[in-house]
Image (cartoon, rainbow, N blue to C red):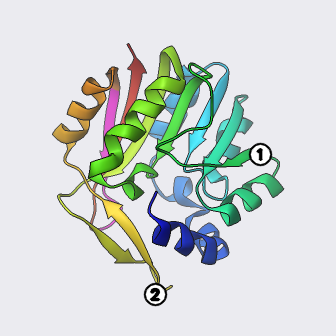
Amino acid sequence: MDKLTVSTYDQMVLEYDEETADFWDRFPRIIIDKFADLVHGHVLDVGSGPGRDGLILQKKGLEVTCIDASKAMVALSTSRGLKSVVGDFCALPFPNESFSGVWAYTALLHVSRAEVGTAFSEIARVLKKRGIFGLGLIEGDEELYRESSGIGKSRWFSYYQKGEVEDLLKKYGFTIIQFDQFKPGSKNYLNFISSKN
């Protein structure tokens, strides 16, 4: 994962937590609620940040393991009672077929297009057959460094068109169950729930 992006998250952990804590209060919860309804068992939250989504999934009765590349984010999610580990999205430190569900909401935005196939392959590897994959990305054509809102520190973002994401899911062995989208600002959020073939 991009080292500058990880460093930014390490430095802005509290600001990011405050900025995003009410995300699912402000925007439709369709994807996270549907994901939780479909999964039974152990879930991996990829790019878990401060544990916002992990806590929601845990409250819905799921066993959750969080993974993030930022040590500061992992420390914060651990302090909130979540099992959390530091790791790379492109080299997940778990055995094959360890999880009934994988949740990756706006986490793979920070993986370059050149490496995103590796991240999809790793998610498929650790997911059980017929396991559920919840994915959130943001629509666009660019990949670039952008300064974080009000922080003045850069993070890497890769944006995708809906068809590109559909092709990636199919290539790495997933069947789409549900798609929805919402546009909270200038960017359109693309939300997918898929099943591993």
- Name the disc covering residue 82, or none: 1
Q: Earlier in the sequence, mark 1 or mark 2?
A: 1
Q: Which residue in the structure is indicated by mark 2?
A: 152
Q: Write the residue at 49% across / 29% down.
A: 34
Tell me which corner region of the image, top left, top right, bottom left or bottom right, holds residue 60: top right
| Relative image position of residue 174 (x, y in whole percent) | 34, 22
Instruction: Name which residue type carries label 2.
Output: Gly
Which sits in the foreground, 50 or 96?
A: 96
Q: Secondary structure at mark 2?
A: loop
Q: Judge whether residue 190 can be spotted in this image.
A: no
Quadrant of the frame with the C terminus: top left
Q: Is residue 178 left or right of residue 40?
A: left
Vertical position of residue 65 compared to residue 42: above or below = below
Q: Write the residue at 41% across / 40% down.
A: 119
Instruction: Name which residue type carries label 1.
Output: Leu
| Relative image position of residue 102 (x, y in whole percent) | 53, 32
What crowding class fits label 1: few (fewer than 14 Cα within 10 Å), some (14-19), or many (20 or more)?
many
Q: Is residue 17 left or right of residue 149?
A: right
Tell me which corner region of the image, top left, top right, bottom left or bottom right, holds residue 49: bottom right
Q: Write the residue at 55% across / 26% down.
A: 101
Residue range in magenta is: 178-185
Tell me which corner region of the image, top left, top right, bottom left or bottom right, holds residue 109: bottom left
Q: Is residue 45 left or right of residue 119?
A: right
Q: Judge whether residue 35 can be spotted in this image.
A: yes
Q: Secondary structure at mark 1?
A: loop
- How many marks can you see? 2
